[in-house]
Amino acid sequence: MIVTLTPNPSLDRTVEVPALVRGAVLRARGGRVDPGGKGVNVSRALAAHGRATRAVVPVGGAEGAQLAALLAPLGIEVHAVPVTGAVRANVAVVEPDGTTTKLNELGPCLSGDEVEALLAAAVASADGASWLAACGSLPPGAPVDLYARLAEAAHSAATRLVVDSSGPALLAALEAGPDLVKPNREELAEAVGRPLGTLGDVVEAAAELVARGAGAVLASLGADGAVLVGPDGATYGESRVDRPVSTVGAGDAMLAGFLAAEAGAPAATALASALAWGAAATCLPGSRMPAPHDLRPDAVRLHERIDPARPLEEQPR
Ligand SMILES: Nc1ncnc2c1ncn2[C@@H]1O[C@H](COP(=O)(O)OP(=O)(O)OP(=O)(O)O)[C@@H](O)[C@H]1O
Ligand SMILES: O=P(O)(O)OC[C@@]1(O)O[C@H](CO)[C@@H](O)[C@@H]1O
């Protein structure tokens, strides 16, 4: 069983437009609504592969009811923690070349009691699980050390903790010694306080997070692939996709692929699985999560040695 905690889930509305024009009224050509939030997506990807997963989420308002309704048929055990505020609605505006602009709401303000109820639900759910994946931004009202507070409970239940977050929540979690963190390039750069222009920069930054408390770092690099840095060194691979349809949730699919393969597997096998799931997600609309028939193991290439001077693609500003 893999348990996910998404303290700030969302209804993800994807809107397709001919071109994004500031200040204009844009008529959508198509769209879709997905249940969202990073941990929810990890659970969706695992469930699409027939893996047992439980998603712990706060649920409130009409959006919360819709989120629960969208999750109900997916084969995910949902542990809904009732909250007063409404679950947020995030919008992704997609242009024909796949360029995606995301508008993420702040999320509802949780009361102290609601935060404690969410933490208690995550701790109880994680008992006996192989992994607890604590993912995404924290809603207003949640303390910055929310993920850090999970570490002790997870470890005393012999459950491994992976944290996929950014900014102060990621920094606070590092100090608590999570087994794994999954920053993307921007989040890793922010955590070490310097830009990352080459693969060597990424490996160095990931090693710094290991030195600061993480058991291992799975750094996702968009079109440049991913690096896994742990006690046994660094492994690098990439997954080439000709025309990505939507990269929203690709990092979540990738983390799910890693966790699904990880039990007892060598680091390279888990990384290859992560890359195959991540690449598959980029070929699907909105934040649709890949099923086994969507996987693209042929797109994955693991590198025997890492070229530290290899430049990374220009990062969009
Ligand atoms: N343009 C692309 N071409 C090929 N693979 C991609 C591309 N973008 C993403 N991927 C795959 O998806 C993985 C995750 O991508 P990325 O680093 O963008 O994650 P992320 O920023 O955490 O995404 P999100 O927050 O939307 O889930 C990459 O490591 C790679 O395997
Ligand atoms: O605002 P956060 O919590 O950082 O990210 C939320 C989000 O952008 O992440 C997922 C894609 O990874 C989407 O389902 C969701 O809308």
Image: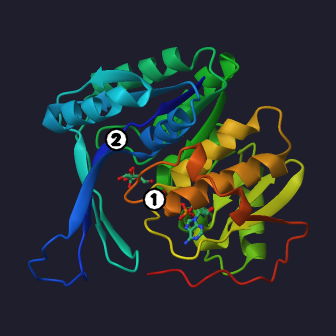
Find out if the beta carbon at label 2 lies less than 8 Å from the nearest ligand 2 atom: no
Name the foreground residue: 70 vs 298. 298
Determine the residue positioned at 57% across, 85% down: 314
Q: Residue at x 82, y 59 (%)?
A: 235
Q: Which mark is residue 9?
A: 2
Toward the viewer: 32 or 65? Answer: 32
- Mark 2 and mark 1: span between their CA atoms? 20 Å
Decide which of 276, 176 is in the foreground and name it: 276
- Frontmost residue, 105 versus 266: 266
Position in image of residue 260 (x %, y %): 67, 37
Figure check: 66 above or below 193: above
> How crowded is the residue under tag 2: few (<14 C-alpha within 10 Å), some, or many (20+)?
many
Q: Earlier in the sequence, mark 2 or mark 1?
A: 2
Image quadrant in which you'd find residue 102 = bottom left
Q: Is residue 211 left or right of residue 41?
A: right
Q: Amino acid at mark 2?
A: Pro
Disc sitting over residue 229 in the figure: none
Location of mark 1 (residue): 284
Provide residue 13's location: percent of width, then percent of height: 25, 55
Q: Indicate which quadrant contains ligand 1.
A: bottom right
Residue 317, image quadrant: bottom left
Quarter of the image for the N terminus: give it.
top right
Horizontal relation, residue 298 to residue 175: left or right: right
